[in-house]
Amino acid sequence: MCGIVGYHGTETASPLLATGLQNLEYRGYDSAGIALVDSDLTVYKRSGEVESLLEVLPESSTQQRGIGHTRWSTHGPPTDENAHPHTDEDGRVAVVHNGIIENYEALRAELSDHTFTSDTDTEVVPHLIEEELESGATPREAVEAAVARLEGTFALVIAIAGVEELFAIRQDSPLVIGHGETGTFLGSDVTAFLEHTREVTYLDDGELAVISGAGVELYRDGESVEVTTEQLTWEADAAEKGGYEHYMRKEIHEQPRALRQTLSGRYDLDSGTVDVEIDLPREYLRSIEEIQIVACGTSNYAGRYAAELFESLADVRTTVEIASEYEFSGGRDPWRTLVVAVTQSGETADTLSAIRKAIRAGARTLAVTNTLGSTVTREVDDSVFIRAGPEIGVAATKTFASQVATLALLAVYVGRERGALSSNRARSVLQSLRSLPGAVQQVLDREDAVHEVATAYADSEAFFFIGRKYGRPVALEGALKLKEISYDHAEGFAAGELKHGPLALVTAETPVLAVLTDGSAATETLNNVKEVQARSAPVIGAVSGDVGESYLDVTWEVPDIGMFEPLVTNVYWQLFAYHVADEKGRSIDKPRNLAKSVTVE
Ligand code: M6R
């Protein structure tokens, strides 16, 4: 996610803010900026690394308060103009923002007499504050009134020229205040200022912090509330991981938030419609005869989940190819084939090579990626962003969930545009998607139980994952996660295929993990569970509803949310893989022989 810093105190702000941004670099970002404030306000911002921002920051400055930001693009490419802070027309109000303002287009329309200079959702905020100030509101009233008009998720820090206070407010996006000896610090996480203070206040949703030379005041709904502090014991390394031992575990736990960001503002449940911000015309979407998904590894499995969705929701033949195997067959009408590259990094060489073949053949192309401005987005006709925030662990976790959720939105969109999906059915799909973040959280809350089972089975000879329909890509992904971080032998199979060969491998020493939920033909898979059980294999089943628990050695319940239950099951598989690997002391965030972004063919 993006990073926020702020400082109000007795020292020169600029170097403190710059160090704060460098401390946040580990989160991943594509541009950075700082606003320094006293009676005037000066903004410095650059696309690229904090290093390039430092080149334009004045060597000496006098301001003792300011705000800063590292941006991970969600609206508009990573350019100087789109970097934060954003300002109003007079350059008096500066705002840094993490999250997504869902209603920014409507707000921009209401502010039609204002000139905007970026593509971002954030820029509406300083303009709204400007309007309130012009109508006579005090700075605090102006911030409160502007924020009251925002829908979505946000952490905002605001500086106003000539105003002594900084303002900070959050809604579903973290923000923490550090109480230092020389002043008050702000950060989207404590790593922003850990070297200066360990005495912190975590803001709650809806709380407004007013930071002045006198310290911090907190307000909720206009009423003052008590400021409580706590003392941190984390070291910097642990703090970067949010107190988790590994990025992978942190990222597994970030999934509810990542999914909320993925879905935020992109669908309307009442009308059963979706907007994924693409420009492919309806006539074109109606004319498509085939969708070809190209992707590698985990992204390929997300693509397989999506292929089922496109066929069933959009009534379009969909194939999924391993990108390194892809050739565009000349027999098809290229123009009527939409080739979709699924790649979290947007830089995977095999996927780029596949998409270039499709472009050369004359097909329309679309990227589904986590990385705005990545190579793939510059080469395809259109892109959809999964908005999962940066993923640092080599093992893909939250990006898989957000890829599937984004592709599901896309399938509903295409289905509706093609007239293949009724509003009723779309509503039921969207309802299931809406339940995803909460259902994933319920699984995360059961991590202790998964840990216990992982410890019990960690020394097994091999692990097999089985599933059908939407459960099949989840079986493949479960096995990939386990093998890449634990180095154990793990395979995923279409459950019905076991008896055609792999069953020979099944023994009492090979646990079988089965997807037995809605959307995974659980009753049929139960027959395969019985087959392995008859060969003494221990069976761990992720189950929703009443699916023959008596055949399972371990039952993990999956909340009843319909067709996305297999995706929720994957969170059990992730936690299981993590704890098996941890038990063995593996290098979880950087498994041997693997890289986060594979830029060679
Ligand atoms: O960046 P991409 O999504 O294109 O990466 C593709 C694969 O290299 C990637 O999904 C890989 O399989 C995972 N990191 C494994 O966890």
Image (spheres, helix red, strand yellow):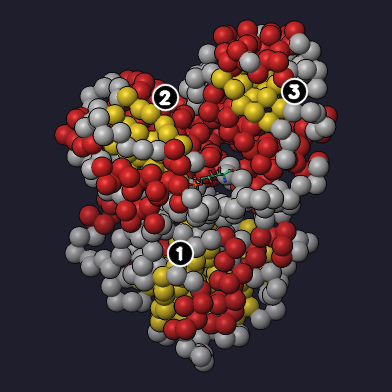
Mark 1 and mark 3: Cα distance apart in space: 43 Å
Q: Is there any visible trace of residue 283 in the rendered image?
A: yes
Residue underneath mark 1: 30
Other residues around mark 1 within 10 Å, as few (<14) / some (14–19) / many (≥20): many
**In this rendering, would 516 be left or right of 377?**
right
Q: Is residue 80 above or below residue 498?
A: below
State the residue in front, 273 or 577: 577
Mark 2 and mark 1: Cα distance apart in space: 34 Å
- Name the spot of residue 301 as percent of width and height, x first: 50, 34
State the residue in front, 214 or 558: 558
**In this rendering, would 422 be left or right of 529?**
left
Residue 9, by quadrant, is bottom right
Front tag of 2 and 1 = 2
Residue underneath mark 3: 511
Q: Earlier in the sequence, mark 2 or mark 1?
A: 1
Mark 3: secondary structure: loop
Residue underneath mark 2: 308
- Name the spot of residue 155 as percent of width and height, x first: 50, 58
State the residue in front, 155 or 291: 291
